Image (cartoon, rainbow, N blue to C red):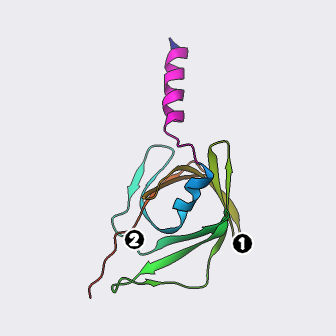
Amino acid sequence: MKRILLLIVLLSVLSCKQNISEADISNLNGYWEIEKVELPDGDKKEYKVNETIDFFKIEANKGFRKKVMPQLDGTYLTNDIQEDVVVVVKDGDASIQYKTTYASWNEEIIELTKDKLVVKNEQEIEYYYKRPAKFSVK
């Protein structure tokens, strides 16, 4: 009975992960706003308002990620700080490899569509992103 239960749990966990193809990687380009974070112990943190948004620019699986700040007129404030990015796709699995002058790290892509991004870092923390809603007070 324990084996059957273990198999069911294992299959349900594995079925939650999307097979990522090379074609899916183009969905990574553009602006992403953090929606929530799930910790390994099940705790969750919801983000209602974000002061910064991530911007990805990927071509041929290489590019960068920048933090940008949305402004009231609908534009984004940015600086010259960016993280170099390499996206690795193999057998339906994909990861984002980040590198700066000071550190390097990886995130596994769990789900990637044109409107949703879920990544898991090396500490098993899952980050849920959505496309930001456009706004302006003009």
Q: Nearer the viewer, residue 47 or 114?
A: 114
Residue 90: percent from the left, percent from the top? 69, 46
Q: Please tell me whether the stretch drawn in magenta is mainly helix, strand or loop.
A: helix
Q: CA distance from mark 2 to mark 1?
A: 25 Å
Note whether 136 is above or below 107 in the view shown.
Answer: below
Residue at image position (67%, 62%) is 61
What is the three-letter code of the residue carrying label 1? Tyr
Could you classify mark 2 by the number of other residues whose Cα lies within 10 Å: few (under 14), some (14-19), or many (20 or more)?
Answer: few
Q: Quadrant of residue 87?
A: bottom right
Tell me residue 35's x, y (percent).
40, 60
Percent x, y of residue 103:
71, 67
The 10 Å Cα crowd at callout 1, few under 14, some 14 to 19, many 20 or more, is: few
User: Residue 84: within the magenta?
Assistant: no
- 1 relative to 39, above or below: above
* Element type at mark 2: loop
Residue 69 versus residue 5 in the image, above or below: below
Q: Is residue 122 visible?
A: no
Residue depicted at x 62% and y 43%: 92
Foreground of the two, 8 or 88? 88
> Furthest residue to the right?
101
Mark 2 lies on residue: 50
Tag on residue 102?
Answer: 1
Observer-nearest residue: 74 or 37? 74
Tell which residue pokes out farthest to the front in this image. Answer: 23
**Picture quadrant where residue 130 is located:** bottom left
In the image, is residue 12 part of the stretch drawn in magenta? yes
